[in-house]
Image (cartoon, rainbow, N blue to C red):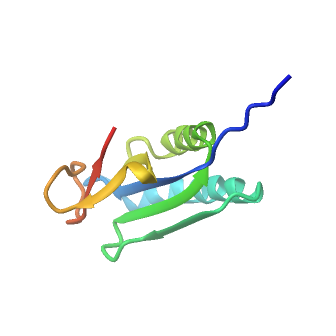
Amino acid sequence: MSQQVQETKPWVLISAYRDNTTPNDLQRISPQIQSLIDEWQSTGKIMWSGAFNDNKTGMAIFEGTEHDAKEFYQKYDHICSGILEYSMQQWMQCRFSRSCQTIHDWNLFIVFVFEK
């Protein structure tokens, strides 16, 4: 019986405040997000994250299998839905560009293009 090993890949998660995000919203979700990151890292997985200089947009880069990344995203979605705008893509599919597509309501002039 052969064992199938899933390949780990780099992933990027971009998040930004919505126009209607309040300080109370952030106080409510921050501990949950920190717990989710702690859970990820406690299993020996690495994640780098931080805010951009507008303090409204952030990025996390991590490595995991497609299954692990989707599971992380589902948990993140459950926490942040309706409070933040966010998108996750495989890093190798993400290119930086000035001329293509933006995520609505972002207060940042960085544009991310995602190839499928």
- Residue drawn at x 52%, y 42% is 73
Q: Residue at x 47, y 70 (%)?
A: 50
Residue 47 x/y as whole percent: 60, 62
Residue 3 placement (x, y as % from top left): 80, 30
Residue at the extreme left = 99
Residue 81 appears at what percent x and percent y? 43, 41
Give the residue at the far bottom of this rendering. 53
Q: Quadrant of residue 35?
A: bottom right
Nearer-the-camera pick, 32 or 93? 93
Comparing 8 with 24, the one in front is 8
Residue 93: image x %, image y %?
Answer: 38, 48
Query: Residue at position x 46%, y 46% from top?
Result: 80
* Position above or below: 112 against 50: above
Residue located 24% across and 64% down the image: 110
Locate the C terminus and report the quarter of the image it occupies: top left
- The vertical placement of 82 against 27, above or below, is above
Q: Is residue 29 left or right of residue 14?
A: right
Figure quadrant of residue 59: bottom left
Q: Quadrant of the N terminus?
A: top right
